[in-house]
């Protein structure tokens, strides 16, 4: 089985010349009843696109995530419910670096990060370095809804999640055959990709963003990436956009990428596409910071932009007038429908 890996030294060399791909709706007011956009990590493809069995598995997983989102949206119309259920699905799917299938620390353990934010009132919740919560995104939601805080970390976050009645597991629950070899050796030089994220414009016209990850392979235990940091890996503002990022977290924190997107749009009046390009190919690529992001605005415009060779991604939206839904998924430069 071929791994979708992110070899950091190689990626650094590739940063200036790797394929760029952005898909954004052409019009500003596009009459969409709702929009759901997902990502499953960005990085080097390592031949994945020539592996038809694995490609199909990823396409199927991305399709499933979008259709779960659609079902929840049709039933509830509620963005946070969609984001949580979509991310729960990814957290249960061993193909992605979130929940089961998460990457390992240099200590051979699993430390998971997640966050969620609502654009209608800027409320947010996040957990960092949790080891026992089966679905970290639900713990992030509990922090948002059940505490006056935004971010809980480490043991306190695990204890809090258990007290909230969330399902807890032994740390080795998160292992898969693929990550087992890293747990045993933890000397691999590559990073497993597959952080997951979901951004939504819901039926009420509200924006929500969520992100969940195991972090970067061989991260020092205790290291926290961008994913649980509001403004770095996740942000949502109804007057701007909802954003979920993936990639080398240290760069995303330093460039406050998720908030940066929102600010460029809200005050700089850039389109999502322009903002994503300037951040990923300007600010980040200059420093060999690699990754990608998904974002959606209140008018139903969205972007899925990356400065790496590929990004697992997909979108689904419903047209208000016709009631038709349109959906597509992609891994490398081209979306499935463009091949
Ligand atoms: N951004 C995540 C982190 O740095 C990793 C990833 O997206 O692959 O923890």
Image (spheres, rainbow, N blue to C red):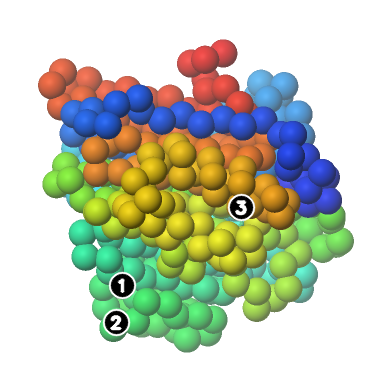
Quote the CA–CA distance across marks 1 and 2. 6 Å
Whether residue 21 can be seen here = yes
Q: In the rendered structure, find residue 144 and report the number of the disc placed on it.
A: 1
Q: Which residue is mark 3?
A: 283
Tell me: residue 92, above or below residue 162: above
Tell me: residue 165, above or below residue 46: below
Location of the N terminus by quadrant is: top right
Whether tag 1 and tag 2 are in contact, CB under 8 A, the answer is yes
Tell me what residue is drawn at x 72 percent, y 67 percent: 219
Task: Place residue 248 in its image quadrant.
Answer: bottom right
Residue 272 position within the rendered picture, expressed as x and y whole percent measured from the top left:
40, 41
Tell me what residue is drawn at x 32 percent, y 52 percent: 266
- The front one of 90 and 310 is 310
Instruction: Say which element carries label 2.
Output: loop
Q: Which residue is mark 2?
A: 147
- Name the side, left or right, on which 312 lies relative to 108: left
Quote the CA–CA distance across marks 1 and 3. 31 Å
- The front one of 122 and 149 is 122
């Amino acid at each position: 089985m071929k791994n979708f890996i992110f070899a950091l030294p190689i990626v650094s060399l590739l940063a200036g010349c790797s394929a760029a791909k952005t898909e954004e709706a052409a019009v500003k007011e596009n009459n969409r009843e709702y929009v759901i956009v997902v990502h499953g990590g960005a990085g080097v493809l390592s031949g994945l696109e020539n592996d038809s069995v694995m490609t199909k598995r990823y396409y199927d997983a991305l399709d499933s995530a979008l259709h779960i989102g659609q079902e929840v949206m049709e039933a509830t119309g509620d963005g946070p419910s969609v984001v949580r259920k979509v991310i729960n699905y990814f957290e249960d799917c061993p193909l992605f670096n979130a929940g089961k299938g998460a990457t390992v620390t240099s200590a051979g353990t699993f430390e998971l990060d997640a966050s969620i934010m609502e654009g209608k009132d800027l409320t947010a919740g996040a957990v960092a370095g949790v080891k026992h919560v089966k679905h970290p995104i639900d713990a992030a939601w509990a922090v948002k809804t059940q505490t006056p805080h935004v971010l809980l970390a480490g043991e306190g976050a695990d204890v809090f999640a258990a007290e909230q009645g969330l399902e807890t597991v032994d740390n080795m629950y998160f292992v898969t055959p693929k990550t087992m070899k890293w747990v045993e050796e933890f000397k691999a030089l590559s990073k497993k990709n597959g952080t997951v994220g979901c951004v939504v414009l819901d039926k009420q016209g509200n924006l929500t963003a969520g992100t969940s990850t195991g972090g970067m392979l061989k991260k020092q235990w205790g290291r926290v990436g961008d994913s649980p940091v509001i403004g770095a890996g996740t942000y949502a503002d109804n007057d701007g956009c909802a954003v979920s990022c993936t990639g080398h977290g240290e760069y995303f924190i330093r460039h406050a990428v998720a908030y940066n997107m929102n600010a460029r749009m809200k005050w700089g009046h850039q389109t999502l596409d322009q903002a994503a390009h300037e951040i990923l190919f300007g600010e980040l690529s200059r420093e060999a910071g690699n990754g990608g992001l998904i974002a959606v605005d209140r008018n139903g415009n969205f972007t899925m932009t990356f400065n790496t060779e590929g990004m697992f991604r997909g979108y689904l939206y419903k047209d208000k007038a016709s009631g038709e839904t349109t959906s597509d998924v992609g891994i490398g430069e081209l979306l499935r429908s463009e091949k």
